[in-house]
Amino acid sequence: MITHENFATEPWRLRETALDLGVLAQSESVFAQSNGHLGWRGNLDEGEPHGLPGSYLNSVYASHPLPYAEAGYGYPESGQTAVNVTDGKVIRLLVDDHPFDLRYGELLSHERVLDFRTGVLSRSAEWTTPSGRTVRLTSHRLVSLAQRAVAAISYSVETVGGPATIAVQSELVANEQLPTASGDPRMAAVIDRPLLPEEHYAHDTRLRLVHCTATSGQRVAVAADHIVNGPAGTAWAAESEPDVARLTVTATLEPGQRLELVKFVAYGWSAERSLPAVRDQVEGGLAGARTTGWQGLLDAQRACLDEFWSSADVEVEGDEEVQQAVRFALFHLYQASARGERRPIPAKGLTGTGYDGHAFWDTESFVLPVLTHTAPYTVASALAWRHSTLPGALERARQLGLEGAAFPWRTINGAECSAYWPAGTVAFHVNADIAAAVERYVFSTGDREFYGGPGLDLLVHTARLWRSLGHFDADGVFHIDGVTGPDEYSAIARDNLYTNAMARRNLLAAADAVSRHPDRAPDLGVSAEEIADWRNTAARTAIPYNERLQVHEQSDGFTDQEPWDFDATSEDQYPLLLHFPYFQLYRKQVVKQADLILAMFTCPDEFTAEEKARNFAYYEPLTVRDSSLSACCQAVLAAETGHLRLAWAYTREAALMDLDDLEHNTRDGLHMASLAGTWIALVQGLGGLRRFRADPAGLPGEQPSGTPRAEEQEWPPVRFAPRLPSSLTRLAFNVRVRQRLIRLDISRSTARYTLLSGEPLTVAHHGARVALAQDTPADLPVPPAPDSPEPRQPKGRAPGT
């Protein structure tokens, strides 16, 4: 997309200078707007043509049976698919009875701009009807970050060169026709007519539709109101039927005259509240929007984004595309989470129905690290959603014959939705990913209330799973058998290293947390013996290592498997999952996405620098990156091991995943984890930000017995190791960590650390202690990268090829 001739590269906005229907679906995704509760795809105002119409409410879904060739105990019984709810953004235009449709007449100009600082999608177009009448239209659209239920559109039309009769039809439309499903498993199931009508209403300028989802029993209400400005004689009428409510405004315009419409839309849903209650909910939201007014909504939107950018912005000098891409990424991550309020952050956010709208472990492992350091209040909300699903996770563990909680691999409401159990049910690492997100959030924010409440619950119940899932062998080594790690081309493995290393971290974090909150131990049934057992299990957990090759194994025996024949695999056979059976992938040395590489990133104190370099060199030639999650992880380890050119190539791949549509599925929505990966590659890769396990919660005065305060430890727990590739001249960013805001400004030779807010803090710069205090920047030299041969990638899979 960004390299498409119609798209401009600009630092603070995404601008499309002409319309190409061949990339319409992709543009709908990149121009999408949301606030974590409500999402609108960037569809054209008039609704057609479209690639994928989309209006979404977080956690509104249709349920459907999961088919199995053979039944099996413990298989999930039903799936969940996010549904396209009532579309409130449709505004149709007729000029002298000719419908404004870009496939007819002559489109003289067309431009769309998504501004990352204002949060507004603007559109301008000039069009001549088949009969020769020309009109000019402009529209501005927002999904409010300040008023959770509200979206709004300002729309105006004028004639050029002569009078015309204009009709503007503002609609609420339910059960829009969707494109048919393809064979790509990453796409969503298509649910025909998911909404059952319950009420429709139209009077004066007000519209309302109320529906109930056909299978999940969720009630959805949408209401709209309008402000109309036009010349004398402007008239309007409202009408409704079960699936459509419409306000039609008509006027005869002379040249220079305008017909202007402001449309306020409010959304609400509930699985429990009555029809009158949900109806009143959206009417209340609509009243608030009318009172605020269009300009008030614009001002509030800008204020929200000004606050976000003040601590989240990343400056990149030397690559204009990545500068635009990282702001695009941060903007969409903020949109996906800002008003989620105890709802999940799906893998596609609210930009499309790819992956059926499910949330995966991607959220905790990729999205939440970024938000923890930029907008931490959104992380508390996302983890509160996980905590709300804890009862279901406890029940799922019992069903599987395990203790503790077993969180789902993919879900909307907390129930497992994967019908393929080798990739779903046994991907138990999601437990540890959640625990790590809790630990990271508490460490960075010092949120004592969360730590001693929902956080402690999550840490304890996730830890208990590992003790019942694994076992000790005759030598006293703890093994975890039959699991699937992040690499989905390996399944049912013994001692997946990422899973084991993260389980160790989970067990120790739970032990530390209960030791800090002994008053809650009785409520959770945690004894001193159980805490000791967690610590002992962590200390004895197997970490597979091949002594002959001097590398860690992704899982026990992985390095003894037959290597994949990359020379016999053509470029058009990627992704491999669409061209080869899984049983062939599972028994070969081929890696879909970073797995062991991710372990070295998330558990840095488990490996020496030499081990990281050898491991990276071994696994690079095996990793095909058939997942959008991989490039950013490889960027981080490439930077850490000194391969800065390669790190930058992977950074660009992560950054341009959706803007360049690298995986050819941006049409279904944006890849939230890869968007997050842009920041990860820049800040944690080139900036070298790491957090080590010392002082795990970062709460002075509450350490478990025998744990020294961070200031008393040999090395600070927060470390940086900045280096720039030759293609960059400067990288600057802010991070929130340990209740401080730190700015790091990196050039080729120097890194400047500035403490912008908070108490003095000691961090590490390439292993050297740096004491930071406000108003006292610290300038330190950037050492050269170690010199070693750059590892190769599988044939045809080098980044940038």
Image (tube, rainbow, N blue to C red):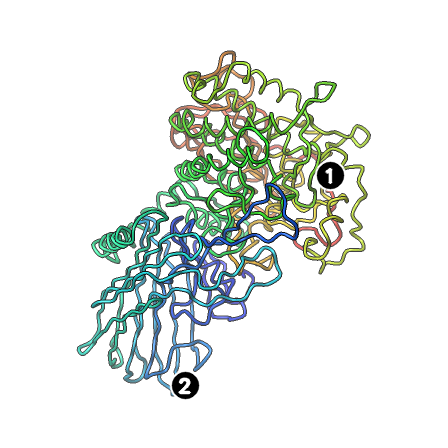
Determine the CA span between mark 2 and mark 1.
Answer: 62 Å
Q: Is residue 538 above or below residue 199?
A: above
Q: Which residue is mark 2?
A: 130
Relative image position of residue 719 (x, y in whole percent): 54, 28
Q: Is residue 654 above or below residue 705?
A: below
Residue most extreme to the left: 232
Nearer-N-terminus badge (2/1)? 2
Does residue 438 lie above or below 45 as drawn? Answer: above
Q: Which residue is at the far top?
A: 706
Q: Secondary structure at mark 2?
A: loop
- The answer to whether 701 is drawn above or below residue 38 in the figure is above
Closer to the observer: label 2 or label 1?
2
For the residue pair 444 and 243, the one nearer the viewer reads as 243
The residue under the point 80% across, 40% down is 561
From the viewer's perspective, tell me whether residue 584 is left or right of residue 339: right
Mark 1, secondary structure of its residue:
helix
Residue at (44, 81) in percent of width and height: 106
Which residue is more in the foreground, 89 or 80? 80
Q: Which quarter shows the N terminus?
A: bottom right
- Which amino acid does the dot numbered 2 rest on? Pro
Discs 2, 1 touching: Cβ within 8 Å? no
Q: Nearer the viewer, residue 751 or 394?
A: 394
Give how far across and how far down residue 397 sits, in percent: 55, 34
The image quadrant of residue 558 is top right
Q: Amino acid at mark 1?
A: Ala
| Label 2: few (<14), some (14–19) or many (≥20) C-alpha neighbours in 10 Å | few
In the picture, the disc for residue 761 is: none
Task: Report the residue marked by disc 1.
Answer: 617
Horizontal side of 520 relative to 486 (left or right) equals left
Q: Position of residue 551 (x, y in %)?
A: 75, 32
Residue 117, image x, y percentages? 38, 51
Which residue is drawn at the image coordinates 62% and 49% (left, top)? 627
